[in-house]
Amino acid sequence: MSGPAEGQKAPDFELAAEGDETLRLSDFEGRKLVLYFYPKDDTPGCTKEAIAFTEHSAEFAAADTDIVGVSKDSVAKHGKFREKHELGIHLGSDPDGEVIERYGSWVEKKMYGRTYMGIDRSTFLIDREGKVAKIWRKVRVKGHVEEVLEAARALD
């Protein structure tokens, strides 16, 4: 698994988002950013995680921290996902998986004895200077968002 280490500069990214918007790392300069990768819109774990980030979005904003969720799903699918669950966070589309790979979140997975490549549920907290402050890999959704919020508050 490659990708950045804590303390390294966060890999640049450019992601398509709703309304012909493009999300770039430079858009968040001077603020903190939670960049999280998840396997698929509208699946149980991914939905719980997106809802939890949305429920805490005001607290993240108070900590001067933006949130961007990333998957390979299309912008249109993200729009339906956002609408269905009233999500209040940015969702970036990475259909080719370039950004997912740059962050080391495209990994070999196993289920029911089958090996395949997929997105590792992972979260990166990026500081105001664009450096990776903290990384969470193989995320379990329960309690995760609160842990990330605590780390964002502790980071100046």
Image (cartoon, helix red, strand yellow):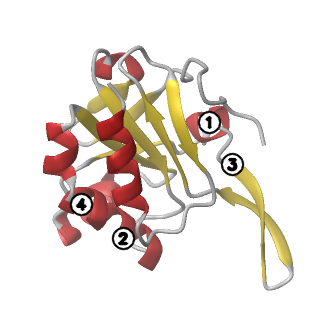
Q: What type is the residue that disc 1 sits on?
A: Tyr
Above or below 132: residue 95 = below
The mark nearer the N terminus, 2 or 1, is 2
Q: Identify the residue position indicated by label 3 in the image.
A: 106
Q: Tell me what residue is drawn at x 86 percent, y 82 percent.
A: 113
How packed is label 4: few (under 14 Cα within 10 Å), some, or many (20 or more)? many
Locate residue 35: give its quadrant.
top left
How packed is label 1: few (under 14 Cα within 10 Å), some, or many (20 or more)? many
The mark nearer the N terminus, 2 or 3, is 2
The mark nearer the N terminus, 4 or 2, is 2
Q: Identify the residue position indicated by label 2 in the image.
A: 47
Q: What type is the residue that disc 2 sits on?
A: Thr
Q: Identify the residue position indicated by label 1 in the image.
A: 103
Which element carries disc 1, helix, strand or loop? loop
Q: Quadrant of the N terminus?
A: top right
Which element carries disc 3, helix, strand or loop? strand
Q: Tell me what residue is drawn at x 40 percent, y 22 percent.
A: 25
The mark nearer the N terminus, 4 or 3, is 4
Q: Report the Cα–Cα distance between label 4 and label 3.
A: 23 Å
Q: Report the Cα–Cα distance between label 1 and label 4.
A: 24 Å
Q: Report the Cα–Cα distance between label 1 and label 3.
A: 8 Å
Q: Where is residue 105 shown, x and y percent of the image?
A: 64, 46
Quick check: marks 1 and 3 in contact, CB under 8 Å? no
Which element carries disc 2, helix, strand or loop? helix
Closest to the observer, 72 or 133: 133
Which element carries disc 4, helix, strand or loop? helix
Q: Tell me what residue is drawn at x 32 percent, y 16 percent.
A: 29
The mark nearer the N terminus, 1 or 4, is 4
Foreground mark, 4 or 2, reads 2
Q: Where is residue 73 shown, x and y percent of the image?
A: 46, 55
